[in-house]
């Protein structure tokens, strides 16, 4: 058995609310020891700065046009990530010398498979200097260079969780973040993954803009439950050809707009967008070769009771939050990037033809050694 490595994983998602940080130990294969997690919230100013920058970047040329703002925010976000690392280590009474690696995802502001460009704000070299720890970052670029979509990357960690939790097969993990993505696993060791459609992003964006950023998300689906689904608008959303494309396939939040629901009552807008998230997840199950026995929900969207109930009702499949297996579903992605950092350090593959469409399984990530 290979020696275990202790790694911190850092994830800043599309909600822009803060940093998820996790410590795990693993050999990069079958062992997993979850040490602990921490959420480091961004201040209101930083949240709004990230959200407004994201609004400005819809195409490749926007990266150059907004380069000064990107550099400013990248420095700020990197420093905040270093603070999250310090707090996490302190929380679990560890020393920096106990940590071998940091897996640093950064904050995605642009991702385009067609342009072969992905941009996550976060400077791995600076983070290594600030923390005194080896850092692996820029996880998606090598996948794109080898013909992949650069996403999703978490499936190999889902596979490890299936082994740890001894789940029924076939099963799917559904991560409902800004974009929703699905990982299918069966007894033939088959692993299929792709982005199913919007997750929380459209709902969050609409509420933030309508409330001048006073409301960040639909807590527990309460707003959706009060609204009415506008079926004609929903059908127009569902007519997007993306949903008929065979996997592997990926999305960026820029692929979707809130314009079709912009003139509706807020409750009806949120209900329609929540139904869109739920239906596109359920419809995606048709791409898999065998009937699913269990759906495991992860990510912030798992807490949305409207979405959870609609997935369960429309699929007629047992649908559980991963928290029911005593794992905090808020930190699956931060744990995953700790695991991916370990695999990257050990030169193990992190993405695969049936998860990202890459031509052959490849490793990924850039290592910055602390000197």
Image: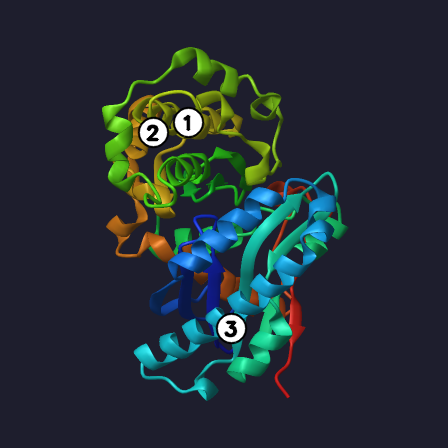
Pinpoint residue 149: horizontal percent, then vertical percent: 66, 43
- Mark 3 highlights which residue? 79
- What residue do we see at 23% from left, 25% from top? 226
C-beta proximity under 8 Å, tags 1 and 2: yes
Query: Which residue was labeled with disc 1?
Result: 282
Using the image as rendered, state which of residue 109 and residue 155 is in the foreground: 109
Relative height, residue 120 to residue 167 (above, below):
below
> Horizontal placement of 135 versus 49: left or right?
right
Residue that badge 2 annotates: 311
**Residue at left 71%, top 56%?**
142
Considering only order in the chain, which callout, 3 or 2, is on the residue closer to the N terminus?
A: 3
Q: Looking at the image, which is closer to me, 292 or 310?
A: 310
Q: Quadrant of residue 147 in the image?
A: top right
Q: Secondary structure at mark 2?
A: helix
Instruction: Judge by depth and name the residue closer to the eye, 281 or 292.
Output: 281
- Asked if residue 42 is positioned above or below residue 368 in the image, the reply reads above
Q: Secondary structure at mark 1?
A: helix
Kindly check if marks 2 and 3 are in contact, taking CB atoms under 8 A apart as contact. Answer: no
């Amino acid at each position: 058995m290979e020696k275990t490595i202790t790694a911190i994983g850092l994830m800043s998602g599309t909600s822009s609310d803060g940093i998820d940080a996790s410590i795990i130990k693993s050999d990069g294969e079958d062992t997993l020891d979850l040490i602990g997690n921490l959420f480091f919230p961004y201040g209101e100013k930083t949240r709004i700065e990230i959200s407004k920058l994201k609004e400005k970047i819809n195409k490749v040329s926007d990266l150059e046009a907004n380069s000064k703002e990107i550099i400013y925010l990248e420095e700020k976000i990197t420093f905040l990530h270093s603070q999250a690392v310090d707090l996490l280590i302190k929380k679990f009474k560890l020393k920096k010398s106990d940590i071998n690696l940091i897996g640093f995802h950064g904050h995605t502001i642009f991702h385009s498979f067609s342009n072969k460009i992905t941009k996550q704000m976060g400077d791995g070299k600076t983070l290594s200097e600030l923390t005194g720890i080896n850092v692996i970052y820029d996880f998606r670029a090598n996948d794109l260079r080898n013909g992949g979509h650069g996403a999703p990357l978490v499936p190999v960690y889902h596979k490890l969780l299936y082994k740890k939790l001894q789940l029924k097969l076939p099963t799917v993990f559904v991560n409902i973040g800004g974009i929703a993505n699905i990982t299918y696993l069966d007894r033939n060791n088959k692993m299929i993954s792709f982005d199913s459609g919007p997750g929380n992003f459209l709902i969050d964006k609409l509420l933030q803009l309508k409330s001048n950023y006073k409301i960040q998300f639909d807590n527990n689906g309460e707003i959706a439950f009060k609204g009415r689904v506008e079926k004609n608008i929903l059908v127009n959303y569902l007519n997007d050809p993306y949903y008929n494309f065979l996997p592997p396939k990926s999305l960026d939040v820029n692929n979707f707009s809130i314009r079709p629901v912009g003139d509706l009552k807020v409750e009806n807008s949120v209900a329609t967008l929540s139904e869109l998230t739920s239906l596109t997840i359920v419809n995606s199950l048709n791409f898999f070769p065998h009937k699913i026995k269990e759906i495991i929900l992860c990510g912030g969207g798992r807490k949305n009771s409207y979405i959870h109930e609609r997935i369960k009702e429309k699929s007629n499949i047992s649908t559980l939050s991963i928290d029911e297996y005593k794992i905090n579903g808020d930190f699956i992605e931060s744990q995953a990037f700790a695991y991916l950092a370990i695999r990257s350090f050990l030169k193990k593959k992190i993405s695969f033809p049936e998860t990202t469409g890459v031509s052959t399984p490849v490793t990924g990530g850039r290592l910055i050694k602390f000197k």
